[in-house]
Image (spheres, rainbow, N blue to C red):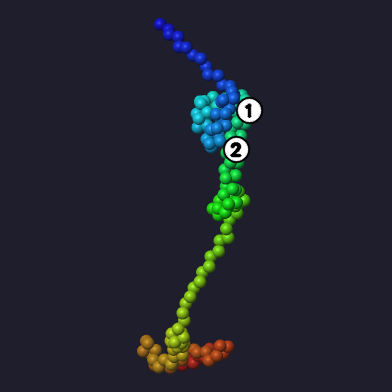
Amino acid sequence: MFHSIPFSPREVKATEKRLQDIYDAARLGLKGDSLALAAGMLPTEYRQLCQLDPAAEMAELKGRADSEVAAARTMHAAAAEGDAKAALAILQHRHDWTAKQEISVDVYQRISITQALSDAASRLTVIDHEPLKEIPNGSNADIQIGRRTTVDDEVVVAADRG
């Protein structure tokens, strides 16, 4: 046996109440499916309404614009009254302003003159050394390691006797 199910399709029309509901939801910042549900429509109905009647999309755009205007006025009023955070937020987000990044590094180091002279003396003893009397492998040849007497002089090396 066949039972008849009563079906009445929902009408999708841009009535004044429906447009006001879309406007109010958009002004609150809702988008997409959330906006449709808050306006009392199914998401498919809202998309269909936007395709059939441009007034529905205009109601959404107007709601978003009015919300942005209200927020901007609040921020500018706060900045004008001396709120530094509001002024900084406006500069950063609306005018692409960034603060200068400066890094200052101060290094304080104490130099001990006696330690510097001691270090220099130890380096000089490595450079100014006595001639070797004996080679480590047991040979007794006199060898004098080259040594500079001034900065521009050539290195003096004893001739090899071997």
Check residue 38 in the rendering and tell me which mark sits there, or answer none: none
Q: Work out which quarter of the rendered image holds the C terminus and state it.
A: bottom left
Amino acid identity at mark 2: Asp
Q: Can residue 47 be seen in the rendering of this structure?
A: no
Q: Work out which quarter of the rendered image holds the N terminus and state it.
A: top left
**Position above or below: 22 against 157:** above
Dot 2 or dot 1, earlier in sequence:
1
Give the residue drawn at x 50%, y 32%. 34
Q: Name the residue carrying label 2.
A: 66
Q: Can residue 133 be seen in the rendering of this structure?
A: yes
User: Quick one: 104 or 131, which is closer to the camera?
Assistant: 104
User: Quick one: 93 or 118, which is closer to the camera?
Assistant: 93
Q: Secondary structure at mark 2?
A: helix
Give the residue drawn at x 58%, y 37%. 64
2 vs 1, front mark = 2
Residue 100 locus on image (x, y percent): 58, 60
Q: Residue reaching furthest top? A: 1
Give the residue drawn at x 47%, y 77%. 109
Residue 12 locus on image (x, y percent): 56, 21
Give the residue drawn at x 43%, y 8%. 3
Q: Name the residue carrying label 1.
A: 54
Determine crowd level at label 1: few under 14, some 14-19, many 20+ residues with C-alpha closer than 10 A: few
Residue 115 locus on image (x, y percent): 43, 85
Amino acid identity at mark 1: Pro
In the displayed structure, does residue 103 sit left or right of residue 5?
right
Distance (Cα) linking label 2 and label 1: 18 Å
